[in-house]
Amino acid sequence: MTAFTIAHRLPRRVRLVAPALKGDPEKAYLFSILLTKRAGVKQTKATPQLGSVTIWFDPKELPLPALLQICQTLLGHLATAQPKWPTARAQTASARTLQFAIEGMTCASCALLIELLLKRDPRILEANVNFANQTACVTGAVSKEELFELVSRLGYRPHPLDTVAQRREWLALERARIAAEKRRLVSALGLSLPVMAIAMLHPRQSFWYWLKFLFTLPVVLRSGRPFFTTAIQFAKVRAANMDTLVALGVGAAFGYSAIALAAGRYRDLYFEAAAGIVSFVQLGRYLEEKAKGQAHEAVFKLIELQPRTAARLEEGREVCVPVEQLKVGDLVRVRPGERIPTDGEVVEGVSEVNEALLTGEAMPVSKRPGDKVIGGCINGAGAFTLRVTAVGADTVLAGIIHLMEQAQGAKLPIQKAVDKISSRFVPAVIGVAALSFAGWQMQGQFALALKSAISVLLIACPCALGLATPAAILVGTGAAARRGIYIKNGPSLELAAKLSALVFDKTGTLTQGRPEVTEVVWLAAGDPKEYWRWIGGAEVNSEHFLARALVAQAQAQKLALPSPQAFQLVPGEGVKAQVEGREVLIGNAAWMARHQVALEAFAGACAKLGAEGKTAVLVAVDARPTAVIGIADALRPGAKAAIAALKRMGIQTFMVTGDAEAPARFIAAQVGIDQVVANAKPQDKLDLIERLKRQGERVGMVGDGINDAPALAAADVSFAVGSGTDIAVAAADLTLVQADIAKVADAIEISAFTLRVIYQNLFWAFLYNTVAIPVAALGKLNPMIAAGAMALSSVSVVANSLRLKSQ
C-alpha cells in the first residue's frame, strides 16, 4: 500500500504528501535527512504542518520510479522505527535548527573549515557558517552539547544565542574583542613606526639594526601572535587560511632577518617589513570589525529593546531581578514609561502600550486585564501587573531576532560557487608564492625572490571574496527588518529580485480579513444616529459576523446602545428585536417578505451593492423600509499602491481566492489586478503556481491562511502577512510583520539592490586578486604596501555593503 500521494511533479522536482509525517516534525525531518543521503537527491524541504516533503533530484542519476520506491521504503521504516539520537533543540519548540555564535574566527577560510567539518558528521543535514556576523546555523539531529564539542575541537569557542540575554552577552564579548583589536593595533603601530623611521635613515652602525630587531620582536610575538596561533590550528587539520598567509609572510621576513643579523649580514634585513605587515593587517582587521559592527546595527537595536531587569512580585512586594530569572507564571509590575520585560497577560491595571516593535505604528494600544502584551514594547502612562506567559527563546522578541539572524547567516546560491573558489584559494596562493620564489632564486636574486614571495602571500585576500556575499546579506536583511520584512533564507533573497509573476490571496491578504460596513443607503427620513442606536441595540448580543460588523459601526459613532426587550433569530434570514418600543427587522429579502415589508424600495440599492460584490443587509423599523447596508471585507491600506508598484517593475499580478466571482472581480478591479481565479480550492491555488512555473515564470505567492500553505510552499518565493496563521508563516520565505502588502514591492527592491552590491563586491574582489597577485609575483610590490592593500580590500567590501543601510 502506498504510504504517500504525489501532490505535483516536475522533471527535477516532486512533492509528496504523507499522512505519517503530518504534525510530526521529528519524523518529517528524519525522512528529509535520510533522503538527502541518497545519491541523486540534491535537496529536500519538509513542511510537517502539511505532511509534505518537496524533493529536488537528478532524474538521470535517480529516475522517478526509483525515488518513489526509496520514499516508500523509508516511510515504511519510519512507521515503526524511532530516532536513535537526541533532537537538535529538545528544550524549544523547534527540534530542527540550532543557531549559535563562534568566537575565534579571523577570516572567511575559518568559516569554510568549520562548515566543512560539521557537514562531515552524518547527523548534520545542513550547516552554514557566516564569517560576517560570526554565527553558525546548523540543521541536524545533534544536541547542542555535541555540536559545541565538535566546534571546540577545532579551537573555536561556541556561544549560545537562544535568548535575548545570551545575545546581549555575545554583544558584550564582541565589543570587548574589538577593544582588544584596537589595543593590539596601537601597540603594533607604536613599535612599528620607530622601526620604519630607522629604516628610512639607512644607518650603518650595527646598534641601529639590533634596535630594529628589539622593536620588531614584541610586534611579531605579541601583536602578531593570533596569526601564528590560528595558522598552527589550521595546520593541525591540514588546512590553511588568511592567517596562514600572514604567518608565512611575517615569519619568513622576520626569521630570515634575525638569522642574517646574527650572522652579521646587514644588507638584506626585513624587520620593517615584518613589523609593518603586522601593523597594516591589524589595522585592516580593526577597521573591518568596526564596519561589521555597523552592519550588525539592526540586531543590536533589537537586543537593546529588552530591559535587563524586572520588578517581580514576591509575597506582595516588588523584587528587582534579572530578566533571565523570570519564569512562566511569575507576576511582574510594569511602571509608566518602562519597557515591558517579557511576554505576558495583563492581570491588573489599565494602560496604553506602544507596539511599534511589531506593528511599526507608534499609536498606543489600550491594554486591560486579559490582554496580551509583548516584551520590548513601551508602556504608557498607566501601571499594570502582568503574568509571564513566555520567557527566553519563546518570546516574540527573541523569535524576531532569531528570524533575522537566521536570514543574515544564510547563503545565497551564488555564495556556494565563491566558497569553492575560496577553499582552494589559499593553497593556490602558497603555490604561486613558491613558484615566484623559485623563479627569482634561479636567476640568482635571493633578496628579490624572498620579497616577491612575501608580497604574494600578503597581497592575496580570500577575505574580500569571503565577505562579498555575507556582508551584503547582513546589511540587506537588516534594512528589510527595519521596514517590517523578515527574510528566512538566502535563496529567497536572491530569487525575489528575479520574480516575474506574483499571486495574491484575497481574504486577509489584499483585504483586512474581517467584514465591515462600507456603504449605507438610507431609505427613510430621520436621524441616522438614532437608527444606528436601534440597529446596534438589536444586534448587540448576536455573534454572527455580519452582526458584529453592524455593532462595530454603531460603536464607532460613540453611541450608547440599548438592550433589546425581545429578540428572535432565524439563521440564514435575519433578526427581529424590540428596541425602545420599536420593532427592528434586520436581514435578507426573504426575511423582509415574511414580515410583509415592501421589497420594491430595497431593489435598486441591493442591485448596486450586489454588482460590487458586497453583502446587502436590509433594515426595516416598524415595518417601514429604512436602509440597505453594504458589508464587505475592506481593502488593506496601500493595496492599490502595492499592485501599481509591482506593475511598474514589470511583474504580472494574479488574484486567486475561494470567494465568489462577483466580489473577487470587484476587489481585483479596485486594486488593479487583471487576472482573477475565483471559487478556488487549495489545490487550484497550487495548480496555478505550477502552471505559471511551467510557462517559465519566476512565481511569488502572497497569502495568510491555512489553505494558502501548499501554494506558499510551492512558490519560488513566498510571502506571509504577519497577521496570518502560524502554518502560513511557517511555509513562507518572507514574513511581512505589519501585514502591509506594500512591503512586497519593498522586499523586491531590497533584494535587487542587495544583489547589485554582491556583484559589485565580487567583481572588486576578483579583480583585485587577479591583478595584485601577478604584480607581486613579478617583484613589483613592497611587502608593506602589499599588506596594506590586502587589509583595505576587505574593508572596501564591507564599506560598499554598508550602502544598503540607506534602503
Image: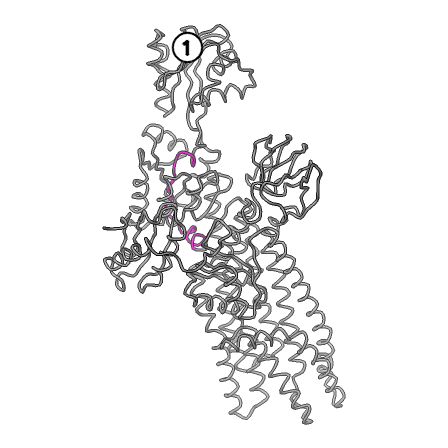
What residue is at 52 percent from the left and 44 percent from the top? Answer: 484
* Mark count: 1
Q: Quadrant of residue 227?
A: bottom right
Rendered view: 645 above or below 267: above
Q: Residue tagged by mark 1?
A: 620
- Percent across and percent down for residue 357 are 58, 42
Crowd class of label 1 (few under 14; some 14 to 19; many from 20; radius 10 Å): many
Rendered view: 570 above or below 597: below
Horizontal side of 282 relative to 453 (left or right) equals right
Q: Amino acid at mark 1?
A: Ala
- Percent across and percent down for residue 217 are 69, 81
Q: Is residue 305 visible?
A: no
Rendered view: 270 above or below 223: below
- Percent across and percent down for residue 588 are 36, 16
Looking at the image, which is closer to me, 650 or 240?
240
- Percent across and percent down for residue 255 are 63, 85
Q: Quadrant of residue 260?
A: bottom right
Image color mode: one colour
* Secondary element type, mark 1: strand
Q: Is residue 585 visible?
A: yes
Looking at the image, which is closer to me, 453 or 444?
453
What residue is at 67 percent from the left and 62 percent from the top? Answer: 176
Looking at the image, which is closer to me, 97 or 218?
97
Residue 752 colored magenta? no
The span picked out in magenta is 491-510
What residue is at 35 percent from the left and 19 percent from the top? Answer: 572
Residue 492 colored magenta? yes
